[in-house]
Image (cartoon, rainbow, N blue to C red):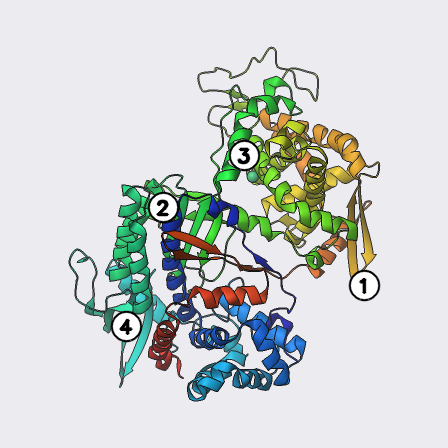
Amino acid sequence: MVDSQYFLPTDVGISALDCGEAFRLLLPREQMYAHYLSRAAWYGGLAVLLQTSPESANIFVLLQKIFRKQTPAQLEQVAVAAGLSTEEYQAFLVYAAGLYANMGNYKSFGDTKFIPNLPKDKLKALVSASQAFQEQPGEMEALMDSCSCALYSLDNKQKQLGLGDKGITTYFSGNCGLEDAELAQKFLDSQNLSAYNTRLFKMNNGDKSSYEVRLASAVQKDCAVDGEGDLHCGTFNFEDKEFLVKRGDYAPLMEKVSYHLQQAQAHAANENQKQMLEAYRRSFTYGSINAHKEGSRYWIKDKGPIVESYIGFIESYRDPFGSRGEFEGFVAVVNKAMSERFAKLVSSAEVLLPELPWPQDFEKDSFLKPDFTSLDVLTFAGSGIPAGINIPNYDDIRQSEGFKNVSLGNVLAVAYATQKDKLTFLEEEDKDVYIKWKGPSFEVQVGLHELLGHGSGKLFVQDDAGKFNFDQSKVINPETGEQVSSWYRGSETWDSKFSTIASSYEECRAECVGLYLCLNKKALSIFGHEGQDAEEVLYINWLNMVRAGLLGLEFYTTESKSWRQAHMQARFVILRVLLEAGEGLVSLEEVTGQDGRPDARITLDRSKIHTVGKNAIHRFLCKLQVCKSTADVEGGRALYESYSTVSDTGAHNFLRLRETVLLRKEARKMFVQANTRVKGDSVELLEYEGSAAGLIQSFTERFQDDAEELETQLLALSKRDAPCWCC
Ligand code: ZN
């Protein structure tokens, strides 16, 4: 029996990443720009196959060849005739979808290998029966032979990524160990050469070994190129070893990246974007990280663009030595309709803020809009999609020029379950309402949380000169009925005073503001929700919050009695507050699931939200704000920690519920992304269904224009590397 952690579950959640509204509202020029950047990202993203495992590129090509000839639906009939059960065929589709979504056969989160959940002979039977095989049996047989062994292998070394005998890596040739990685790093440092876009290959020539440092670039010439003289290509002796630094890793892919960046330049919104793309283009053409840094500097200056992007060898998590970057490229766009609703919310701040539960004195003298950008992802090429980005990673640039912090709205929106059978812990009748209203209610909560939540409330401060920013003799603490007796002094700040609980406490305050203000008709009408629809939106927002509070237990560590995620802790705290409110507002029961294993049910009485629920949040939010405003760390900490405690005593056994949450936890979702295609002088958006078949179809159509050429190039790149992993 193979451990199930090495399969992707057949019922894994697969969701379409919806970017339709945002994309259609772009101007034609912006759509063109987004299109060419997307093409650059997708081609570059294929390098991840070569960065993951020796067999990934061949598996990718095998799948592309099969699905270019037959859609998943057509292939199913072939599969049945070849003796596969429906479950086995579904397992094959999920495997293919997983390989595409992770750009290789190792999970991008966790770095463990996954293999197809069907017998090898069944997979071979399916491949042999496919039309692609019928048309080119010799080629397909050779392709299958080149990867079928590694595809199923779960030797100890194969089970995870790692260096030397710890695992598989293609950032280093198979004969490299930690000492080689360390020596190479010293060499690179001595040459002032960044490791980000490199790989290391150790060559054994008789009794003397030498190293090859390969730079990712379109040009293969090893001499210095005009203007890129900072690149130290050539042969070097370092600590008695020979190092050859050469260009041309992933050359055909880098060439396509460069070409499409150049196409995008013609549609840039301004000179700065043009310069940025020019610098990136140089970086991928010549393998220069300095050029990439230059591009990143322009990128930081490209403030609040309608079409946002970043591309290159960025995150170094998957290099076992931690210094080589994995390729990623993304294109995300402002959702103009949503931005307009958020802008309306900001302009209504004066009307909405006085509705909050604290006295006027506890509110800022004038509202300052927090710095918040939410973008919808059109394209995210690489091994996985994060919910937010905080780049660049170059420390020197972060310190001198800064960075960008962006929340990816449509990724966050589907991070919560959207398929009915994945909606744990809810009543059947709630599930349909939840699915229908989850999107709109999420947008309302995000807007209220980010803008009026984080943007509200005043801190009482006495500056170094002794001057107060409030009238100490008049302001009354609503909790005690007495004058305010504590405040921030001099350089004290919220974070410095509340330290360890500051971030979760603040998230909790912002979440509560969202819950509280979504009960306000005016706030909901800004988002276009009136009458019964408005009631549904606020009901689902509240229901989602109590469910999220329960799900949050996944992020609690019992051994250290600590929380690992600020937002999830905040939601658990809110669940506790609403349970404490009583009167049947929220009910949380432990039950036995249909599978006979522990389960839970959470319900919310919608008739009590406006009364019991609103009062509870009113009281709690007021306390949170008063402790925050008055720098009352002791009171704030006692309050927050009492609700954060996870114990097995009291009305609910939260430790046991946590086990249930872990048991029922959904496997990491996969995303189906759209394609863009130029048609005449406009750009078409091609969208696919959220399923394994949809994900597969999106990849075959993504590369259909130059499929044969690309597949040949990928196989050649993989073959060039192949001898380096033989033992
Ligand atoms: Zn927040």
**Label 3 neighbour load within 10 Å: few <14, some 14-19, many 20+:** some
Relative height, residue 691 to residue 404 (above, below)? below
Q: Nearer the viewer, residue 293 or 64?
A: 64
Residue 56 is situated, as x and y percent measured from the top left of the image, at 45, 74
Residue 592 location, quadrant: bottom right
Find the distance from the CA under tag 2 to the CA under tag 1: 54 Å
Disc 4 element: strand
Q: Is residue 716 visible?
A: yes
Q: Which residue is mark 3?
A: 341
Checking the image for residue 212, the label placed there is 4
Find the distance from the CA under tag 3 to the CA under tag 1: 43 Å
Q: Which residue is mark 2?
A: 29
Residue 598 is situated, as x and y percent measured from the top left of the image, at 79, 60
Report the residue at 24% width, 71% height from top. 243
Relative height, residue 359 to residue 544 (above, below)? above
Residue 4 location, quadrant: bottom right
Say what amino acid the circle numbered 3 marks. Answer: Arg
Find the distance from the CA under tag 4 to the CA under tag 2: 43 Å
Quadrant location of the C terminus in the rendered image: bottom left
Report the residue at 46% width, 77% height from top. 62
Disc 1 element: loop
Disc 2 element: helix
Q: Report if the CB atoms under discs 4 and 2 are less than 8 Å apart.
A: no
Q: Report if the CB atoms under discs 4 and 3 are less than 8 Å apart.
A: no
Question: Which comes before the other along the chain, label 4 or label 2?
Answer: 2
Say what amino acid the circle numbered 4 marks. Answer: Glu
**Label 4 neighbour load within 10 Å: few <14, some 14-19, many 20+:** many
Checking the image for residue 594, the label placed there is 1
Q: Nearer the viewer, mark 4 or mark 2?
A: 2
Q: Report if the CB atoms under discs 3 and 2 are less than 8 Å apart.
A: no
